[in-house]
Image (cartoon, grey):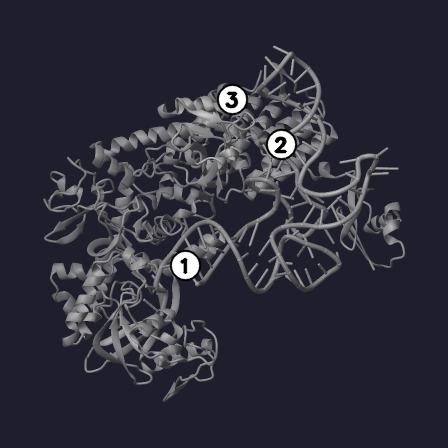
Amino acid sequence: MEYNHKNIEQRWQQYWRDNKTYKTVVDESRPKFYVLDMFPYPSGAGLHVGHPLGYIASDIYSRYKRLQGFNVLHPMGYDAYGLPAEQYAIQTGQHPEITTRNNIARYRSQLDKIGFCYDWDREIKTCDPSYYKWTQWAFIKMFNHYYDTEADKAMSIDKLIEHFEANGSKGVKAACSQELDFTADQWKAMNDKEKSDTLMNYRLAYLGNTMVNWCPKLGTVLANDEVSEGVSVRGGYPVEQKLMYQWCLRVSAYAPRLLSGLDTIDWTDSLKETQRNWIGRSEGAEMIFAVDNSDVKLEIFTTRADTVFGVTFMVLAPESEYVDMVTVADRKEAVKEYIDSIKHKTERERMIDKKVSGVFTGAYAINPLSGAKIPVWVSDYVLAGYGTGAIMAVPAHDSRDYAFARHFQLPVIPLIEGADVSEESFDAKSGKMINSSCDGLDLNGMEVKDAIAAAKRYIEEKGIGKVKVNYRLRDAIFSRQRYWGEPFPVYYKDGIPCMMDESKLPLLLPEVDSYLPTENGEPPLGRAKNWTSAEGYPIELCTMPGFAGSSAYYLRYMDPANDNAIVSKEADEYWRNVDLYIGGTEHATGHLIYSRFWNKFLYDLGAVCEEEPFKKLINQGMIQGRSNFVYRIKDTNTFVSYNLRKNYDVTPIHVDVNIVSNDILDTEAFKNWRPEFKTAEFILEDGKYVCGYAVEKMSKSMFNVVNPDDIVERYGADTLRLYEMFLGPLEQSKPWDTNGIDGVNRFLKKMWGLFYKGDDLLVTDEAPSKEALKSVHKLVKKVTYDIENFSYNTSIAAFMICVNELGQQKCHSREVLEMLLVTLAPFAPHITEELWHALGHDTTICDAQWPVYNEEYLKEDNVKYAVSFNGKARFSMEVPAGISSEDVEKLALGNENAAKWLDGKTIRKVIVVPGKIVNIVIS
RNA sequence: GCUCGAAUGGUGGAAUGGUAGACACGAAGGACUUAAAAUCCUUUGGCCAUUGCGGCUGUGUGGGUUCGAGUCCCACUUCGAGUACCA
């Protein structure tokens, strides 16, 4: 029998399906291991060869763990809500559910061909009512909870109401949108609407008037992580700032725990760093500046309390409430004009246009330490959303303030000895303070670090301000003006938002006649008929964003059919959390933050038993496309080979990489590729047409998309799996280049040759030779180590070496070959399953035992030593294994080759590294 | 600007501080074939010597630590990723 991947792979994939080989159940007698892939959004384009990279890596790990005796949970599902299906629906009228279902079917068939060990009985889809019931459920829970900063956890909103009834807002320790001040009597006097509004200030899911990223083209708001460089991540449409009344999640309340939790999990440093930056903790002080001739007190945040003596002006964000409060009568018009000019600019324009702009309010603030009168300005370089939306400007030591001061000719006072601020500001936090003293505080001569501490202490004592920690992490905006998403289980009773009864969930997504907004600008759900609660109140028209459904999906895999709880206690306490999560870095500041937040909230509720959802996380690199080019001579249909192109005036044209092999064009296929090339002529070099290449994003328009189905068809899934892993280190981004794939395919054929010659099974029960045992034990040792370290590419090299060695030794020993098979099984499950059964086993190789290597077999008879003089290797010698360092030293010095190097030199030192090196230091 | 990461043959990439270039691709030569494909064998960092077994050089650049540095430390160059008026 020859190695026929098609028969083998079909047969065993069928066998696995029929026997439910990958079905997983809770089994207290075995340790659990949960391996998770980031589930895909099923796009219309299907999978390309880059998508399975991470899936293959996690599949290998899952199979390996199973062979080691772990009960492995390895599920897969679909992140099924999303914009592309809806955009497609708008264009074609096709219901997004149909598109999504079709795409999922396509994904499934593609995934199945690669031979993954998913337990498909646990499949989930975020658009399934039985799934999104729990997304809606969690939302209701968030609505009904607030964050108690003293207990440092989420608490029932009823507790807060009790507190208000007894004490008003006094002594409340809760995360909130703004500090409120009211008495118990005032609380009791409030009507329902006022009470609702007050509680919104504290709820973890709340309606808030917030500045949002509005994307007019998509007709919806976007979260911060869905916007990059002023345009939407999906589609690349411009995004502008807009004030809107939206559902939000108080993610910021969890900022400290999201930060400290990073220390307890095994993620890469770079990813943790990205999250730390995103959370953006900064320690500083909040200070109050009084405004001259006014009751207004400006509150600002600064990390440089030491620089108060250098404050020469204040700046307000254009959106700040302070602007109206402080602007003097005859400046009102100028200020309004400025703010209007800002509003008309999109975020993008603001970023491109780095010109300094601003306007004077006419007001003056009083420096609380020096007593100096300083002007208050408005400028768009101050952000409304961070800190208090107002800053104290220290032009000498902040480059942005410096630019502003120079532009408007405001004074600059240097505060650090030796700092030259004539050309630019001195931003570094080091040096000795000058010009910094007043009654009761003298910072002069102090190091910056000490001065910050001293200044903070002083302002707290004097009541001018307080030490404060600020976070950059903003609350997540949770409303989308879209159709294809989870409906909010919310109705409005006389304008007061109310949650539906949990027992009525799920609230099903209604049918609509069109997926566009209504004529009066309402979201598509405004078109739904009878979109009212049982009592006849209108239901929320927005739907939830993409990250809603993906925030807790790993929990549902544990117990996917449960209709009574998001996950049963039994399943949760057994599977706990994800032991290994594999996915791309692009989710660092989105999904991976929201998931951690969501899980922590459920943990506070007591619904889950682990505070962190993903114990270990590996980021697989991106697979880029490798495009090929042909060179057409201008105004002809003649194409010139790569190395001759300089002799002509040519236009490079993308050519389908699937008709190019090792950069050599299949010219016949090219003629048939597109009608306009039917009559193409070629100028060849050495009888071949050589193409140029470039590394680009994998996309249809560049004709560089490689479909895994084609690779599977031609070489088989096992070859695809091995090759994807062989391409390079898992975490590194690399272009897909089909050129090397023959190598791994050859390896599989060679391995097949150890078992079969023609139709004859060569395997014998003879005792294996010493060398064969050594080869295979060396392999097991290497591969075990490599899998644990996700160094799959080097383990494939080890397989190649082992198979070559066994081939040379003509080893056909069952003992050795079975070890080889089991070790290879995670990488190439089909061929190993086939050969495993050929050896007479009647159960799947998945239930075999991972081999244990024996150091005894790895011992060398002779050890090769490199002998070097002053670190330069001069010759190598063999010595019997196990002799002492002193004897090796003697042998080295006595070796005839050593004589010519030692001639006339003095030996200062001899260093023997066991098994490796003898270094003789001479002078 | 800031943060993190990387730099090794024609290419992808190996190397707990211990003979750099494993493994693979590609290329060249050879065997088997009428021929091709497939398969197998040899060579393959550079330079020199190849009737000698060898020598020199070599991991982005410049320093340093060490008996010994691709690996550790300092400075620089280039590239990649993330983030960006976060006060």
The residue shown at (23%, 67%) is A320
Spatial separation of the CA atoms under disc 3 and disc 1: 48 Å
Give the amino acid at mark 3.
Answer: His
Q: Which residue is mark 2?
A: A800
Does residue A16 appear anywhere in the picture? no
Q: Are marks 3 and 2 on the same chain?
A: yes
Q: Is residue A753 above or below residue A878?
A: above
For label 1, the crowd category at 10 Å Cα-Cα, with few meaning under 14, some 14 to 19 and many 20 or more, is: some
The residue shown at (12%, 53%) is A495
Mark 2 belongs to chain: A
Foreground of the two, A114 or A263: A114
In the image, residue B13 lies at what x, y percent?
57, 42
SS of the residue at dot 2? helix
- Side (left or right) of A314 relative to A40: left
Spatial separation of the CA atoms under disc 3 and disc 2: 19 Å
Foreground of the two, A774 or A120: A774
For label 2, the crowd category at 10 Å Cα-Cα, with few meaning under 14, some 14 to 19 and many 20 or more, is: many
Question: Of the residues under marks 1 and 2, which one precedes in the sequence?
Answer: 1
Give the amino acid at mark 1.
Answer: Asn
Classify the position of the C terminus of chain A by image quarter: bottom right
Q: Quadrant of residue A2?
A: top right
Give the amino acid at mark 2.
Answer: Met
Mark 1 belongs to chain: A
Q: Are marks 1 and 2 on the same chain?
A: yes
Q: Quadrant of residue B25?
A: top right
SS of the residue at dot 1? helix
Question: Of the residues under marks 3 and 2, which one precedes in the sequence?
Answer: 3
Q: Which residue is mark 3?
A: A5
Tell me whether the residue at label 3 lies in contact with that at label 1, contact meaning CB atoms closer than 8 angstroms.
no
Q: Are marks 3 and 1 on the same chain?
A: yes
Foreground of the two, A331 or A469: A331
The residue shown at (16%, 61%) is A195
